[in-house]
Image (spheres, rainbow, N blue to C red):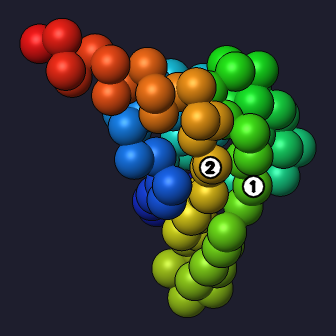
Amino acid sequence: TIRTIEFVGDNVTRDKILRRELLIGEGEPFRQYLLDRSLTALLRLGLFSEASVKQIEFDKKNRTVDITLSVTETPETVRKAKDEQESN
């Protein structure tokens, strides 16, 4: 069972945008193929140049998994966010 899903590298993109694209969720069974498809879905957003698994920790005693995903926002994503902040 997935206990936690954390993100690194999402400096301007909100976590809820990332979570919306995932085919997996906290409290659900861990399935590698859904994790792989989730990474593809993140890349299809066009906000990231890279999306990968940084770490997967298995807790055999509690039968849980903690997942850390890493994304790299495109320069365009960062620029747009900066422009929006300046206009507000």
Q: In the displayed structure, does residue 10 sit left or right of residue 32?
A: left
* CA distance for labels 1 and 2: 7 Å
SS class of the residue under badge 2? strand
Q: Name the residue under label 1.
A: 52
Q: In which quarter of the image is residue 45?
A: top right
Q: Name the residue under label 2.
A: 71
Which quadrant does the N terminus fall into? bottom right
User: Relative to 83, is 69 above or below?
Assistant: below
Q: Position of residue 13 (x, y in %)?
A: 42, 33
Q: In the displayed structure, does residue 48 sit left or right of residue 6?
A: right
Q: Position of residue 46 (x, y in %)?
A: 70, 21
Q: Which of 79 and 29 is in front in this view?
A: 79
Type of amino acid under label 1:
Ser
Q: Which of 25 and 45 is in front in this view?
A: 45
Q: Which of 42 and 87 is in front in this view?
A: 87
SS class of the residue under badge 1? strand
Residue at 46% from the left image edge and 27% from the top image edge: 79
Q: Looking at the image, is mark 1 or mark 2 earlier in the sequence?
A: 1
Q: Are marks 1 and 2 in contact (CB under 8 Å)?
A: yes
User: Relative to 13, is 87 above or below?
Assistant: above
Residue at 59% from the left image edge and 35% from the top image edge: 75
Task: Sort mark 1 into few (<14), some (14-19) or many (20+) by Cα contacts within 10 Å.
Answer: some
Q: In which quarter of the image is residue 64?
A: bottom right
Q: Which of 9 and 29 is in front in this view?
A: 9
Type of amino acid under label 2:
Val
